[in-house]
Structure formats: structure tokens, C-alpha cells
Amino acid sequence: MMRVQDPTAGAPPGLRLERLTLRYGARTIFENLDLQIDSGAFMVLLGTSGVGKTSLLKIVAGLSAPSAGRVQATDGRSLAHRIAYMGQQDLLYPWLDVIGNVMLGARLRGDKPDRARALHLLGRVGLAERAAALPAELSGGMRQRAAIARTLYEDRPIVLMDEPFSALDSFTRARVQDLAAELLQDRTVLLITHDPLEACRLGQHLVVLSGHPATIGPPIRVHGPTPRALDDPELLRTQGHLLRMLTELEPA
Ligand SMILES: Nc1ncnc2c1ncn2[C@@H]1O[C@H](COP(=O)(O)OP(=O)(O)OP(=O)(O)O)[C@@H](O)[C@H]1O
Ligand SMILES: [Mg+2]
């Protein structure tokens, strides 16, 4: 079993979101939002469509600026080059083959691409045979798996993923969730999903974004090692709790 690890890294930094506010024109999406993700924690963010999850993740990734507030690493150092981000759209480059897409970050940084590792990760997401294919030749779920391999290849201490498994059938989804749980074990992770079962299989802290402007409710703590088995009593207990919370939410 391969462990993707940066030998120079100790414990990954945690993330502190401080008084984040986002306005689009006259609309306030969220205001004075605070959230802490501890070092090495796997946090899952849920919430109805349109509530502001992607907008929040992009701010954490440094891809867009908040109207006010800030995001900091808990070790006080800069977040630059320490975050891997997988967007809601897979964002593969259409003119690069699959393996070229996986190693794109290395190429852009001028690092020597590690083809063996890229191929290994493609194998783990079931795409070893398609390494030379162009994105347009893949199904939506295959493109998503290629984007997951690229995110894991990046090998950063902080990993942000926006509905990474949404296009996968339930069998492939469970397999790729297992892989993510294994490879992200010693990272600080913030993952968005609409799937309560996925949240409860993978997450240690579950948070729900809701309301206008949106706020984050108190985290639900899920104990024990991940990925959790489907009949794990802790999973079943939390899933019930979460489903009750989600069904009480207003549409965004
Ligand atoms: N660049 C933008 N300009 C103006 N409004 C935007 C922009 N991006 C997002 N919005 C609006 O902000 C709100 C939150 O969008 P966001 O994509 O963050 O939602 P989400 O929670 O990720 O939804 P989903 O679950 O459907 O992905 C939506 O009402 C959306 O229309
Ligand atoms: Mg979204």
C-alpha cells in the first residue's frame, strides 16, 4: 500500500477562517463566518444547493477574495503552495492527456514530473489504462477520477475538495472514497458533499452551512477510524442525526 507523504512535512497546518464575509452586489452570501479546522482533521461541509459552499471553498483556496475577513494557517505561516484544490468542475486541460493532467502542477512549477507516481495514482482510481487518453474521450466520472488523482498527486498538507465523487456510480464512489480516506489520513481536509452517507463515512467533523446570510452550525463530531463501514453504529447514529438536520433546512 502506497502512502503519499511529503518527507519534509510534519503535522499539517490547521485552518482558521476568521469573520469571513462575502457579498455579490447587494446580496450577502455569508457574514462574519468563523470556522476552525484542526491540524490533520477531516471536515465535511454540507448545505443546500446555492447556499455558498463553493464560494467559501474558493476563498479558503485563495482563488477568490472575501469581501472581509481572512483565512490563516494555524501555524502562522503562509498558506501559499500548501493547498491542493479540486473544484466542482473537473478543470482538466483538454489538450493534455490524462497523465499530463495529473502531473500538470509539477510541470507548471518546473519540477520533474514523477510519472511512476502519477501512474500509480491513476491505477488506484481505475484509470491506468486511460493514461494516454484525452479528457474529451472520457466519461464524466472518469474525468472526475482523473481530477482526484491530480489532487492526490499534488501531495499538499491541506486538501480542499468540492463534491469530488458526485459523478461516480455508487460502487466506484465507495472505492474512491476508501482511497481518499487512506491517502488523506494525515492531511487537513475540507470536503464538500451533498451525500450524508459520504459525509458520515469520511468525516471527523461535519458542519452544515445554512440560512441567508449563511451561517455554520456547531460541528457534529464523528468518532473512530475512516472510512467507516456501512453498518458501523457510529455512522448510522450520525447519519440519522445529520438527515434530521438537513431535512429541516430551507432551500437556498
Ligand atoms: N461569481 C459570482 N457572481 C455572483 N453571484 C455568484 C457568483 N458565484 C456564485 N454566486 C451566487 O452565490 C450563491 C452561492 O453559490 P455557490 O456556488 O457558492 O453555492 P453552493 O452552495 O456551492 O451550491 P451547489 O451545492 O449547487 O454547488 C448562489 O446564489 C450563486 O448564484
Ligand atoms: Mg457548489
Image (cartoon, grey):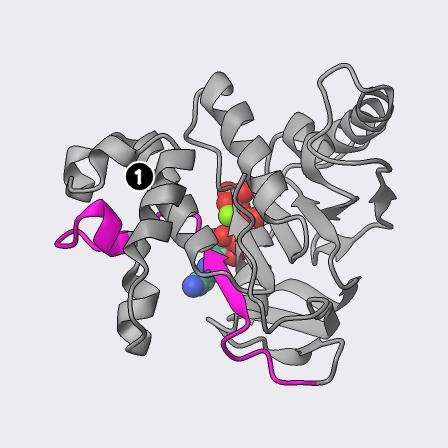
Quarter of the N terminus within the rendering: top right
How many dots with numbers? 1
The image quadrant that residue 148 belongs to is top left
Q: Mark 1 points at which residue?
A: 143
Quarter of the C terminus within the rendering: top right
Residue found at the far left of this picture = 95
Q: Which residue is drawn at 67% across and 85% down?
A: 77
**Nearer to us in this view, 203 or 251:** 203
Q: Is 33 rendered above or below residue 195?
A: below
Residue found at the far top of this picture = 231
> Magenta segment: does it hold 49?
no
Q: Where is residue 203 in the image (x, y as percent from the top left)?
A: 72, 41
**Nearer to us in this view, 148 or 251:** 148
What amino acid is found at the position of numbered circle 1 in the picture?
Arg
Q: Which residue is drawn at 76% across and 26% down?
A: 243
Instruction: Give the prevailing secondary structure in the magenta stretch.
Output: loop
Magenta span covers which residues? 77-101
